[in-house]
Amino acid sequence: MFALHQQWFKKLFLAFLPLVFLISGCVSTQSGTVASANIQENVFTVKGKVQKISPEKGVLIVSPAKGDRVTLNFTEQTPVKGGSIADIVRFHPVQVSYAVEDGQNVSVSIEILPQGSCN
């Protein structure tokens, strides 16, 4: 009987686990690394270290602690908290909010984070 009760508890736990993640805002779209920024439609965030930045091409590649690198497009008008596009350098941590438009990740905002803030 104890084993039957334990199986029931596991099923109940697994049924409610996605709901807990949904409520906490930890819903992921890529290997647990890109989370929904808020309830806005198609707006996501990625936090990681800059692997490449090309201001001329408007391309930023961010490598999160876990998961795949994310390639993001930006413009001169993209707001940058904590500095400017010129302040973004390789291996520096950033957090980027972005929207997916026509299959491309378009930066909505970029935040330059203090060194050591990405594990």
Image: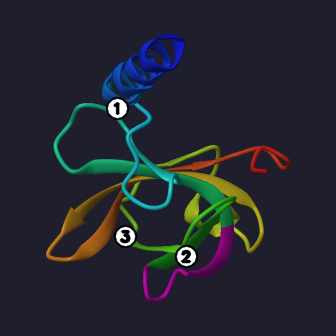
Q: Is mark 3 on a helix, strand or loop?
A: loop
Q: In this view, does 44 lie above or below 103?
A: above
State which tag comes first along the sequence, 3 or 1. Answer: 1
Residue pictured at 21% horizontal, 50% vertical: 42
Residue 83, how many percent across, how many down?
64, 50
- Residue type at mark 2 is Ile
Closer to viewer: mark 2 or mark 1: 1
State which tag comes first along the sequence, 3 or 2. Answer: 2
Q: How far apart are marks 3 and 1 (CA)?
A: 36 Å
Which residue position holds label 2? 61
Q: Is mark 1 on a helix, strand or loop?
A: helix
Q: Is residue 24 visible?
A: no
- Residue type at mark 3 is Thr
Q: Is residue 56 magenta?
A: yes
Relative to residue 54, is residue 21 drawn left or right? left
Residue 14, how many percent across, how many down?
39, 30
Q: How crowded is mark 2: few (under 14 residues within 10 Å), some or many (20 or more)?
A: some
Q: Does the magenta stretch include residue 21?
A: no
Q: Is mark 2 on a helix, strand or loop?
A: strand
State which tag comes first along the sequence, 2 or 1. Answer: 1
Q: Is residue 79 above or below residue 88?
A: above
Relative to residue 34, is residue 117 drawn left or right? right
Q: Nearer the viewer, residue 115 or 47?
A: 47
Residue 75: assigned label: 3
Residue 18: assigned label: 1
